[in-house]
Every structure is written in structure tokens, then in C-alpha cells.
Image: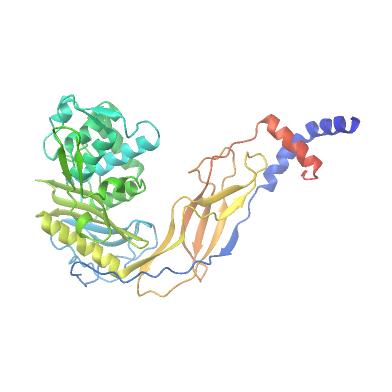
Amino acid sequence: MKKVIILLMLSILLIPCYVKAEEADNKEKSITEQNDSTTNEESNNKESDTLNNKNATTENTDTNGENINNDDAIDTSLIPNATAGILMDATTGEIIFEKNKDEQVAVASMTKMVAQIIILEQIEAGKIKWNDIVTASANASGMGGSQIYLTTGEKMTVEDMMKGISMASANDATVAMAEFIAGSEVEFVEMMNTKVKELGLKNTFFKNCTGLDEDGHYSSAYDMAVIARELLKHEKILEFSSVYEDYLREDTDNKFWLVNTNKLVRFYEGADGLKTGHTDAAKYCLAATAKRDDLRLIAIVLGEENSQVRNSETMSLLDYGFNNYKIEILKTTDDIVKEISLDKATSPKISLVPLNDIAILSKKSADTKKYAYDIKITNNNLPLKIGDEVGKIIIKDSNNEKIKEEILTVTENIDKLNFLELFGKTITDMMVGNMNFV
């Protein structure tokens, strides 16, 4: 009994030393490990449309969201009729092709992609639910253009409103959701412009949530591609945008047939989204995405004269990308790249994963390469939650040169032990001889 009392007294006196020692022990050193992944070869794709074989050319950089082509002159023949356009790899954000990518133009209903992002964020945060009932105001039901013909006072679920926005590009449903979430369209548009700023976009500003023509309402091909990429991070969107036809008010006398305005989801291999647009100022626009094997592309065309040319030139962009490029996924967000221990943490082992998939985009003609990576711990301050930056994973080529890096985060929320938990752990460590001193 005397030994137990002595141990208890010693543990109380030694806790401050133990806490200081923990900080010294948890300073992580950078480690380098050889990545044993092999290149994923793209399978031969059967194309449904004639490919324009002229190469798109752009400047070569290695930064995220920049061009990877290195030809000498810009070739816009893939989309000769479009005012502007871009082809982007969705995983890395790298640009494969561009034409007037930063020109500020009207983008019509492609505006609604930002509204969709906000709706999905509200769902994921638990602020609204798919089965919540939305009541259409006179303002919402009075919207012109594309619509699902809401009547004033009509009630519809959030899920059905999202169907109307995603498939029919419904202005009335978009305004109804804006009012449901923010109280008014004006307040919702402020949320949209805030989101645009968070994404770092400099050529986008919205005056309304629908994309109807209005002075001072504009975006660009590049900004639209970044917005589309952000929208695709919410995988739920594809459950709406990939459907070609559906119904609203199905069990009523006012059954409404929805047909997707994006015809590529039916006629182009791998296409599953995203958003069309058409107004007098914007002409015909499209943000399209398609995936084959691991490669997902985002194609944007703006200012086309009609929907047929819009669809044709969008497919030319996608064909070019799938025929000429491959992607190697080095690490996914589910791959644990390192485990660390923090003595004051509620979990004995903390698993670190990339915040985003880590991938290498290259020409199909490029040689297979091997990569190594360094892991650096930058933050071990508790508590930690999913999405917090804990470290970085740095990808290096065979010349030991950095080619990209990605943030590391935790797989679960980690709290700090309270006093009683820390006291109990201290006693246990003393008993098993696992005590550290400075």
C-alpha cells in the first residue's frame, strides 16, 4: 500500500516533466520512402466522334492549375467557333487546352454551379436535409426562362428542387432554394460571391443566382472550370447531373417530365455532368465532365452559336484529352501514408492521409516514371479534426526534384486527453516503464 501511495505522489510531481517531454518526442523528422506504385496505363478508348488530331498548345509549367503542354504556338482549332474554352484534368487541376481562358463573358445558367455547391455544402453541414420542404414564393414562381413551372405556394422537397436545377436548369427552383437557404436571393448571391473569392477566382462576379443576363454578371472559362472542379468534390452532384430523364410531381395530376439539357450524358462515353447555359448575351455554353478509367476531364465552351456546335466542340475537347493523356494515381484520400503518436491524444495512433488524391497527368507517349516522396509533419497541436493540415507529402522525380506536394490530414477527429485521462495514462506509463524525462 505504501508503494502505491508513493507512486501516486511521484506521478503528480512528474506530470509537468512528462508534458514537456511529450513535445520533444513528437517532433517528426522528414522521411523519404520509395513509392512502389506502378503506372496505370490507359486502355484504348473507342471514340464516338471524329477527333481533331491537331495538338492543343500551351505554355509548360508544373504548378497546379497550369498548362502541361509545351508546344510553341497556341492552336485553337479544337473549338474554332467558341468565344472561349478550356480543358482541365479534374484530379490535378492542370490545363490541357485553353482559348481565351481569362476573358470575362456572360455564362448564363452555368452560374448555377455555384448555387449547387452551396446547396450541397448546406446538406453536408446538416443545415438542410434532402427531404426538407421548400415553399415557392411569388418571386420564385415568377422567374422566366428555363423552369419547372412552380406555382406560388407550391411545396417541393430539396431533392426535387435539386433535380430541377441540375437537369432542367430551372430558374424558379434555383431562386426558391436561394430564398430557403439565405432568406432572399440577394443574400444568397452574396454567399455565391463569397464562395468565388474563397476559390481565388478573379474574373467572376454574380448579380443573380440564375445566370439571366444582367450587366456586371460575368465569369471566364478558367473560373468556370475551377468552379466545376469544386462542384465535383461533392460526389452527390453526379447522382443528379448524370441522369438523362426523370419526373417531378410523379404522383399528381401535374406530372412533369424532366429531360437533361446536357445531351452528352446520353450520347458521350463516360459523360456524367455538369451544366448547360444559354442566354442572348452568353449564347450557348457548356461545362461538361466525363470519366474513363481514372482520368476525369472538365471541358468548358463559351459563346457558341447553337447547341449542336456547342456539343460538337465540347466532345472535340474531351476526345483530345482522352486520346492523348493518361493519369497515374499515386495516392488516394483513403491511403494511409504515415502513422504518428501524440502522447496527449485520445487515440494512440493517428493516421495521416492526403487531403486530395495525388496524381500525375502526362502524355500517353511519355515514358513510365518512378516517384519517391517525403513526408513532413508541420502541425501536431491538439485537437485535430478531419481537414486540418497536419503535414505535407512531397512528390519527387528520379532526379530528386519536387514535382508537386499535397496536404496531409487526419482520418478522424482527435481530441486532447483531459486531466484525469492524462493522470491515468501517466500512471500506466510509469508502471510499464514507458515514462520519458527531459
Q: Is residue 105 visible?
A: no
Q: Is residue 392 visible?
A: yes
Residue at 20% over, 62% down:
315
Q: Could you tell me residue 384's position as x and y percent?
A: 55, 40
In the image: residue 134, left or right of residue 261: right
Q: Where is 230 relative to 291, above or below?
A: above
Along the viewing direction, whichever of 153 and 320 lies nearer the viewer: 153
What percent of the width, then of the height, locates residue 398?
A: 51, 71
The residue nearer to you, when weighing 157 against 298, is: 157
Point out residue 111 in the picture as x, y percentages from the top left corner.
Answer: 22, 43
- Looking at the picture, how far across and down is residue 395, in whole percent? 49, 62
Residue at 19% across, 41% down: 247
The structure residue drawn at horizontal position 47% and vertical position 52%, both measured from the top left corner, is 333
**Residue farthest right in this picture:** 2
Q: Between residues 320 and 14, which one lies in front from this camera angle?
A: 320
Please identify the quadrant where the C terminus is shown: top right
Q: Residue at x 80, y 40 (%)?
A: 430
**Horizontal arrangement in the rendering, residue 129 relative to residue 108 (left or right):** right
Q: Foreground: 148 or 171?
A: 148
Vertically, is 274 above or below 363?
Answer: above
Indicate the quadrant where residue 338 lies.
bottom right
Q: Quadrant of residue 179?
A: top left
Q: Is 18 on the left-hand or right-hand side of 66?
A: right
Quarter of the picture containing the N terminus is: top right
